[in-house]
Amino acid sequence: AESRLLKRRVWSDLPESELSDLGCLQYSLTCTRTEFIEKKTTTQESWVSSLPYTNTESHLRMSAFEESAAEMWRYTLEEQLKTHANEDGYILVTAVNYIYRDHLMNWKCSLERAGMSDNFLVGALDEDMYKWGLMQGLPIFKATAQSDDENEAGTSGYGSDHFKVVTKLKSRVVLEVLNAGYSAVWSDVDITWFAHPFDALAGYMNNSTGIAIQSNAPYVANPAAPATPHSSVLPVATADPTGYRRLNSGLYVATNNKLVRSAFEEIINDASKSAGTEQPSFDTILCERFPSERHYKSCIYRPAGRWKSAAPRNSQLLVQSLDRFSFPNGAILVGKSNENVYTLGRKLFEKETGG
């Protein structure tokens, strides 16, 4: 139900009063408008099979329609970057498979509310997502790294083994963008934006030659009061922003240069050896393993096996933590009663959207 929040705002331009009459407000799963759009989209998806990307390895001769479409096909990484990256070469990028399409549309809705209607790009992690994204008119491309066909929530849900495998594709998508010559701002689709991302991150994008990444370290405003951010989380205490395993790979700025590309190559390689998600590999490579170095709210990344104590400064990379009050995690507790910023954010979100 959470993933369907504000779907009405994304897929419909009907007045809210009409949406209410149709039963499409709040978390309704029986909205006739949504059912109509889903049915129409499914029908349209059947037409996509005639488009050129599905026929690239076929021995059959392309029709004149397919040949023409193939020549002008713009839903590739290269063409989408040319169209949507900003003048400084930055692109906001995310990537999802088909079962997270609702989350994606909510994310897109929050971007539009924050004033961002361009400069973002979606990597499709499976064929179904690519087809569906085309039908929605999204700025989408088919990522080189693809997930398998396990698209049922029961096998791909949060925390499942399949989910962990899929998370490892995210950094591969970012490396594709970097190798294409562009800089990336990565955002998971479960992030809600209250400000234009490039405005909010301008200080990191304009002044950084490295990586700036969200911290998941807790912060407790009042140590004397209870500090339990959620019923599923144990009481927490304030921790260093870049302490052990405190890098959060759900949001980061990656400026395109040789050292950043090297870091992502190492992260991908390290994650491929793990049975977990890719997130711990960010900490391992950027902060933990020698010769990288950890500090209070930053790390120094140095490529493995190529560092000497007298090495020049351009052979190392600054990894900054994003300000945790501007880009908070669920364990940032503020005020005398240690109120969770997620709770505060949800209240603001519902106030702004009428949810």
Image: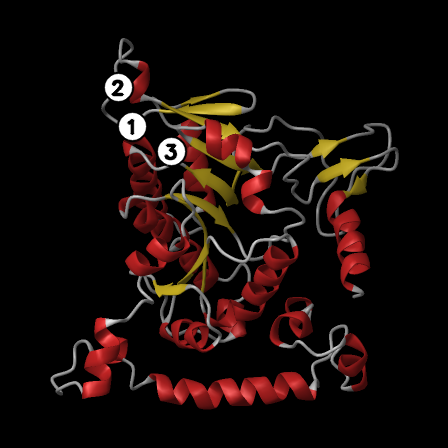
Which of the pair 168/318 is nearer the observer?
318
Q: Relative to residue 248, is residue 137 depicted above or below?
A: below
Amino acid type of the residue tagged 2 in the rendering: Trp
Q: Residue at x 42, y 85 (%)?
A: 45
Name the mark on residue 307. Answer: 2
Q: Residue 273: tell me if it is visible.
A: no
Disc 3 marks which residue?
285
Q: Secondary structure at mark 3?
A: helix
Amino acid type of the residue tagged 3 in the rendering: Ile
Q: Relative to residue 178, is residue 260 depicted above or below?
A: above
Q: Quadrant of residue 126?
A: bottom left
Distance between mark 2 and mark 3 Cα atoms: 14 Å
Question: Are the residues tagged 3 and 1 within 8 Å (C-beta)?
Answer: no
Quarter of the C terminus within the rendering: bottom right
Which of the pair 283/326 is nearer the observer?
326
Residue 186, how many percent across, how many down? 47, 47
**Residue 247 as seen in the image, left or right of residue 18:** left
Q: Quadrant of residue 6?
A: bottom right
Q: Residue at x 11, y 84 (%)?
A: 59
Q: Residue furthest top?
A: 310
Disc 1 marks which residue?
303
Amino acid type of the residue tagged 1 in the rendering: Pro
Q: Secondary structure at mark 2?
A: loop
**Which comes before the other along the chain, label 2 or label 3?**
3
